[in-house]
């Protein structure tokens, strides 16, 4: 293995470690604050809380532009080479994209509550609080600051942001449990959590840029110049559409289950999914750490390095998945019973299906950033479109036929489709750009039989 490959893997696992530490603390806290919320509200009202907050998260994910990816894609080279003015213009574009899309999300969320609140199983008495909660969407997007953390290899700052949110939500839920607070209070706690994360992420991102000297020539309204970032709008919209379709899969499935089976079943589905994804989360958190490393290898034209890193990650994920299945068999149903304060018949099989869907998603972890970096983000978008068109009618039909187990099985089918669609172009790209093994004695970039992919494609 070459030095660049070893360094890339070292940074990937080191940065993933910071993300895992933050999310692991958040996951542990979630077991506590969800249990407190269920006991304070009851399962039905907790289901309404999950449906309202899930709808807000879904609208946010569906409307905000994923600005951290264009910041890395177009900002890495000028940032590394000290072209501050060009980097500042790219950064300003990304910040504007976050704030504008946050405002659009708030409007869409408010309109969505007015039009569809009754169809999603929310009692009319709770829809006023749902309207107020939609304002939270305006400050849910912290994408540009996440891009700064990744660009500066400061993933530990993401951990601090996650910890601030987990602390606020846990303390707030504990107070609500002690004083028997209602749904309006818990929606306020969820909203304040997002506000604290937005403020802390923005402040830390700006301080990091000041530390590197990248804010000296910054202006929020500075327009991009010709040659700064060719194709940035197409790239941003493609990655954001991919994220939008992913949110349809992750969030609107819960909303659809709630509309069919009611808030209580939606709560069980949402929490069991959270347990399955939480068990698989350590490997899923690898994806943000992969982007900057794949970009570095791309700039070096080290196609064999990219291939070897991807294969090693696949092997590690495969071994990790076997371990996850054992963990889910042992503790999955126990966690579900403890968090919901009720024993749900068939909880183990439900969590195993949810974990199966999450594990299939792990297979996409190295593929999605690779396809994005090499200019084939359209392949990821194609996969999301196919999965969305398949998943929504599938989850509706299977939920009607087999209830929660059917909804979980539909997620497994969708995950399998997504993995197959993404794997095919990656294998074809490796055969063209890095066939066989690296030639003996060849350095990075020496044996690339095809041209470098363009950044704007």
Image (cartoon, rainbow, N blue to C red):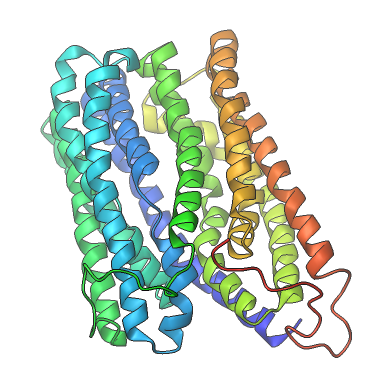
**Closer to the camera in the image, 200 or 319:** 200
Q: Position of residue 329 (x, y in %)?
A: 62, 36
Side (left or right) of 112 relative to 183: right
Total numbered circles: 0
Q: If the image is split into quadrants, where does the C terminus sit?
A: bottom right
Instruction: Tell me where residue 331 sits by quadrant.
Output: top right
Quarter of the image holding residue 399? Answer: top right
Q: Give me the residue at 68% from left, 63% from top.
A: 313
Q: Say above or below: 105 vs 39.
A: below
Image-based side of 100 in relation to 8, left or right: left
Q: Residue furthest top?
A: 401
Establish if 406 lies above or below 448: above
Residue 12 horizontal/vertical position (percent): 56, 71
Residue for point 26% across, 32% down? 109
Residue at 64% across, 48% down = 379
**In this rendering, would 95 be left or right of 273?**
left
Q: Indicate the position of residue 11 as horizontal and vertical percent values.
A: 55, 76
Q: Is residue 409 visible?
A: yes
Residue at x-position 24% and y-position 83%: 217
Query: Which quadrant is home to the N terminus?
Result: bottom right
Task: State the residue in front, 228 or 361.
Answer: 228
Asked if one can make out residue 169 in the rendered structure from this viewpoint, the answer is no
Q: Position of residue 68 (x, y in %)?
A: 41, 62
């Amino acid at each position: 293995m070459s030095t660049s490959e070893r360094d890339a893997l070292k940074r990937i696992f080191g940065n993933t470690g910071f993300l895992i530490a933050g999310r692991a603390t958040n996951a542990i806290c979630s077991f506590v604050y969800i249990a407190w919320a269920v006991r304070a509200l009851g399962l039905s009202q907790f289901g309404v809380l999950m449906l309202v907050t899930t709808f807000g998260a879904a609208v946010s994910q569906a409307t905000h532009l994923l600005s951290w990816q264009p910041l890395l894609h177009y900002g890495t080279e000028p940032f590394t080479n000290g072209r501050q003015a060009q980097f500042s213009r790219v950064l300003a574009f990304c910040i504007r994209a976050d704030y504008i899309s946050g405002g659009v999300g708030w409007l869409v969320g408010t309109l969505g509550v007015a039009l569809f609140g009754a169809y999603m199983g929310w009692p009319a008495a709770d829809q006023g609080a749902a309207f107020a909660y939609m304002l939270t969407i305006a400050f849910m997007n912290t994408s540009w600051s996440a891009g700064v953390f990744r660009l500066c290899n400061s993933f530990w700052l993401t951990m601090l942001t996650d910890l601030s949110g987990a602390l606020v939500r846990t303390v707030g839920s504990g107070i609500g449990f002690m004083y028997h607070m209602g749904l309006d209070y818990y929606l306020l706690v969820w909203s304040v959590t997002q506000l604290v994360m937005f403020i802390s992420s923005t402040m830390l991102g700006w301080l990091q840029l000041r530390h590197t000297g990248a804010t000296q020539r910054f202006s929020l309204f500075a327009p991009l110049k010709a040659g700064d970032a060719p194709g940035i709008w197409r790239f941003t919209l493609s990655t954001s559409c991919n994220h939008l379709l992913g949110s349809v899969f992750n969030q609107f499935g819960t909303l659809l289950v709630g509309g069919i089976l009611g808030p209580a079943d939606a709560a069980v589905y949402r929490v069991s999914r959270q347990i399955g994804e939480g068990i698989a989360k350590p490997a899923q958190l690898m994806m943000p750490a992969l982007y900057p490393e794949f970009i570095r290898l791309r700039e070096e034209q080290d196609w064999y390095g990219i291939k070897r890193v991807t294969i090693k990650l696949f092997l590690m994920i495969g071994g990790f998945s076997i371990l996850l299945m054992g963990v889910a068999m042992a503790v999955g149903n126990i966690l579900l019973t403890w968090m919901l304060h009720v024993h749900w018949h068939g909880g183990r099989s439900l969590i195993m299906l949810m974990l199966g869907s999450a594990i299939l998603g792990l297979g996409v972890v190295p593929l999605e950033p690779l396809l994005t970096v090499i200019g084939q983000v359209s392949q990821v978008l194609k996969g999301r479109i196919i999965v969305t068109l398949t998943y929504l009618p599938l989850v509706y039909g299977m939920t009607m036929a087999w209830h929660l187990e059917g909804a979980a099985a539909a997620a497994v089918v969708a995950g399998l489709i997504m993995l197959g669609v993404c794997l095919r172009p990656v294998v074809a790209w490796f055969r063209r750009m890095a066939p066989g093994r690296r030639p003996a004695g060849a350095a990075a970039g020496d044996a690339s039989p095809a041209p470098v992919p363009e950044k704007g494609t």
